[in-house]
Image (tube, coloured by chain):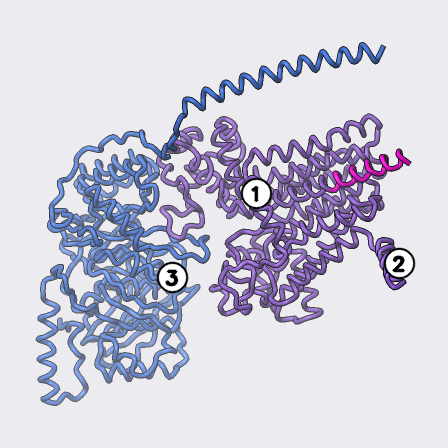
Amino acid sequence: MRRRPLNQAVPKLKPSMTRLLILVISFCTAASVTLQPHVIQAEEQPPRRVLLLFDSLAIGTAREGNVEAMLRLLAVKGLQAKLQRVDEYREGQLAEYRGLVFMANNPKPDGSNARHLYAEDLLRYGLPYLHAGYDLPSAFAERLRLRTALSEAEQAQVTIGPLEGAPLGEAERMPYISDSQGTPYGSVAWPSSGKQAPFAVLEQGIAYAPVFVAGAASELAMAYMLKDWLGDSRTGSAHLLLKEIYPFTDLALLQATADALYDAGLPFIYSVRPVFANTDFPAMRRYLEVLKYAQSRNGTIFAEAPVVSGAAGIQTSPIKEKMAGFLNLLAESSIVPLGVGADAGLYLRNEGQFAEEGMAFFRSSALYPDSDAFYLEQAELNTTFPESMLCVRWDELEPYWKDRSSATLPVDVAMYADFFTDAAGMESALRRWKSDWIVFADFKKGRHLTRTEAYSLESSQGTLAINGSPIGLNDAVRAVSADYAYREEERKSLERLFTVQNYVYVTVICFSLIVFGVFLLIGVRLYRRKFMK
Amino acid sequence: MDRFHTGRWTVRWISSFSRFVSPALLAAMLTVAIGSAALFVKPYVGMADNGDFYRILYGNGLYFNAPDYDGQYFGYFVRQYGIMQYFNDNEAALLSSQSLFIRIAVWLNKLLYSPHVFDIRAQGALYLALYTSAVYLLVESVTWKMPRKPGYFVALIAVFMFGDTGYTAYFHSFYGEAVVLIMTMLLAASGLLLCRGRYNDYAMLALFAVSALLLTAAKQQNAPVGVIAGVMGLPLLLIRRKAFRVTAGASLALLLLTGIAVYALIPQEFVNINQYHAMTRGPLLTSGNPEAALAAFGIDEQYAILAGSIYYELYTTVDVQSPILDQSFYGRYGFLPILGYYLAHPAQAVDMLQLAARHAFTIRPEAMGSFELAAGKPFGEHARFFTGYSELKQALWPKTIGFVAIWALAAIGFYAPSFMAAVKSKNMRAAMKLPLVVMIILIGLSSMAVSIIGAGDADLSKHEFLFTVTFDLILFAGLADVIRSRTRARERKGGGEG
């Protein structure tokens, strides 16, 4: 099985001896780069840039959302990416990139000039190419010796790594690889007809996947191929992540869940919402105590991105200072946030430079698929996260996760769920986690770093450190006193004097009013007696 | 000789002027002149968008067509908007009587100016025409049968107060305050005219009902106006019998129902916004112990972290429309529980009322600019043309709840003797004046109460615009009545001596 790393140039059609020499030198350089063990260094290598083209967002079809899914995958692999429509491609643009991904969602492309332009540039520059969808250009189809066919309209299932029989797309006619000389990845089966085909193939830097949809199984399958396409030697683990944790989530349940997971030997991640105001309130201190406790019970803390309010209108806000403030607060409470959790849309749309300002503290991220659809036609991903996780809903993959103890994952996978609303929900989930085949790894075992101006927060082989000093993990949740001066007492002088004075005045005035009333009554009676006989 | 002729000519001119130009007509002419100078002479005066315009704009077939619109928020008012040419699939974000006036203005614009571009001056002209007639009726209601000289003086007071650019600037904006101003004035004027028996009773009753209806439906927070007008307008039933009584009764019932309907039809988004602020900018803000305040409502003490926060913050801990707030926060309190909380905690109630009073005398919010970008004025600059009254008002009146209470009691006390005398003499028309004054005071106070109970201290100056209008109307009516009674007293004294 021959594989070439991304950094190696795809061989030209008729190499001369000189070109061969250059090729060998390039290979040696690339190998020395990709095979180096990953170490957190002050100066990291510059991230690789990939151009992502698409011809259609496939809105209203089974492929809707696959462009955003691909962007997330590229972000997980630590790549910088630029997204644009294939029609806007200009000649020579590929010179700025290390590879090209094309999402061909339109089953009937219009044969525009741009498609020829990028294909020609690819051949000219010899860059790696990943094609997902319809109509692989013939020049590349020939290299793969590719033959495709169209399936019947029935539900397809994908099997790859630990996944077996996970649904792929919808029950509709879809292209599949009937023959290819490339390395196959996974298999797609149509149980009714008994047909089987590879999910994707890869050969000499050319990768082809006829069907890629947004969804946990498809994204994990694509991640397997991306790993080899990029020449990435790292493997990944599965992690359990619980999100939607607020300062007003049931703190007792948070604590009980941490205990239950610890007793079950399940490491976990709590992705917690930030707080930017009232951080000295007792309520906030209770929140921090519980997070610290969870950390001590084999938990890892992620700082989740704040909610961006749609009702805010035209406003700017210093998100960098706010996030730094929250992270510093966690550090001061001996809590080490090892990564950031955020909806992918927040990162991809990057409104108000959110990625640069609010997320640049972190090297690790968990980008959740957005629950609301959004349609991105342009994006420029410049902020990268070298250690990131592919986020999939736990209940999307768990039913198809079979005992494949020898199967390794191509990337770190965060299998996430929303935090529970009651103990019954927690116990039910815990039973399933204990009984299924998924082995969750401890995120702290890896090397992760979060940095603010004041603090350097890191993990290595299960140890947490703040500014280089390992922290002891607190066992007990300390009680927080509700005694707190919410308001500053105003300075008062001569308070007693004025209070007494007020009582005296009130007494005198009331007495005077009574006396006045009495005199008024007497006067009225005298008047009546005198004048109204 | 020349001096004699000049003097005679002057006297003749003054005599003709006072014969043909009533104080009301004078007030109307001056109002339209000053308003036109502000609105239709460069640099045009208006009010900048604070982000609220889109709610009323898109549902009425208009859209932002200025390419640099975003950069003009708060700082400059935009004069021109696009008119949608094809099917408008935008639903109205809110139901408001303001849409009626916008649509009439768009129709006028299409007729006289352009079918593609809406110039807000068309709306300004429509509002100014309505406002001028409102000023005319108001001044007429207090100066009818008043000698000309004091009448003209009252008219000038009216022009000084109500011709202020702080009021007329709203006509070049898509805020509901323009409708609130005109309808409140028409409501007061029609009520006073009914009291005095000036003009046809049915016509004035119709004006009373329509203006109250349009005022109630202008903004969701005006829902209590319909209820107040429907209840306090009951003395109208005693003015005349039979057909008038039936008509008046039906009108009042309609007003009552409109108030309830406006409340019920508040969009959920606004319910959540106000619900959020009612707690975070209400009891949690003023309480010395937010956790204890939350406990009073049966809410988890951890929500104390939200104390003081506002719905419109860009980056927040929790989505204000999220299920966790729906279940554990919004569902635990409402208007009546918060009212009950303030009644049980009078110190906090007073704090909130003081906060409300601080913003109650502002006609025009500080944040919004008055000029177009093309006028070359600094960002957020306010117009200073004919703004004497609004500036005086903001500087002069004590901004405390004590002063508001004194104002209300003084106004009621001022009209109480005449009310008792009218009741004794069975003059129900004259007796209606006190209930009318109380109605206007309650309408003003309701805006204050609804603001702080329904939405905490969020956006108070805009929410209390109705109070500032009613304050000015009561003040003006009181001044006019003082001038009338002194004039009468002088006449009686002069007649007696004669």
Q: Which quadrant would residue B260 be assigned to in this image?
A: top right
Q: Residue at x 75, y 47 (%)?
A: B154
x then y, percent, for residue A120: 28, 84
Between B179 and A502, the one lying in front of the other is: A502
Chain B color in figure: purple
What's the residue at 71%, 54% (across, down)? Answer: B131
* Residue B8: image tag: 2
User: Where, quadrant-wise, is the N terminus of chain A in this rendering?
Assistant: bottom left
Give, as a three-letter code, the residue at label 3.
Answer: Ala
Q: Earlier in the sequence, mark 2 or mark 1?
A: 2
Q: Is residue B213 visible?
A: yes
Name the spot of residue B139 as percent of width and height, x first: 76, 48
Which amino acid does the dot numbered 1 rest on? Ala
Q: In the rendered view, tell whether residue A21 sits above or below residue A470.
A: below
Left or right: where A408 falls relative to B227: left
**Per the image, is A325 magenta?**
no
State the residue at coordinates (36%, 59%): A345
Give me the disc on residue A171.
3
- Sort mark 3 into few (<14), some (14-19) or many (20+) by Cα contacts within 10 Å: some
Name the residue tied to disc 1.
Answer: B360
Drawing shade for chain A: blue
Q: Residues within 10 Å of mark 1 (few under 14, many from 20)?
A: many
Closer to viewer: mark 2 or mark 1: 2
What amino acid is found at the position of numbered circle 2 in the picture? Arg
Q: Secondary structure at mark 2?
A: helix
Element type at mark 3: strand
Measure the C-alpha gap from mark 2 to mark 1.
50 Å
Q: What range of the chain is rendered magenta? A: B480-498
The answer as to whether the residues below labels 3 and 1 share one chain is no
Say if mark 2 contacts mark 1, CB within 8 Å: no
Where is residue A243 drawn, in percent x and y?
30, 47
Q: What is the magenta segment's predominant secondary structure?
A: helix
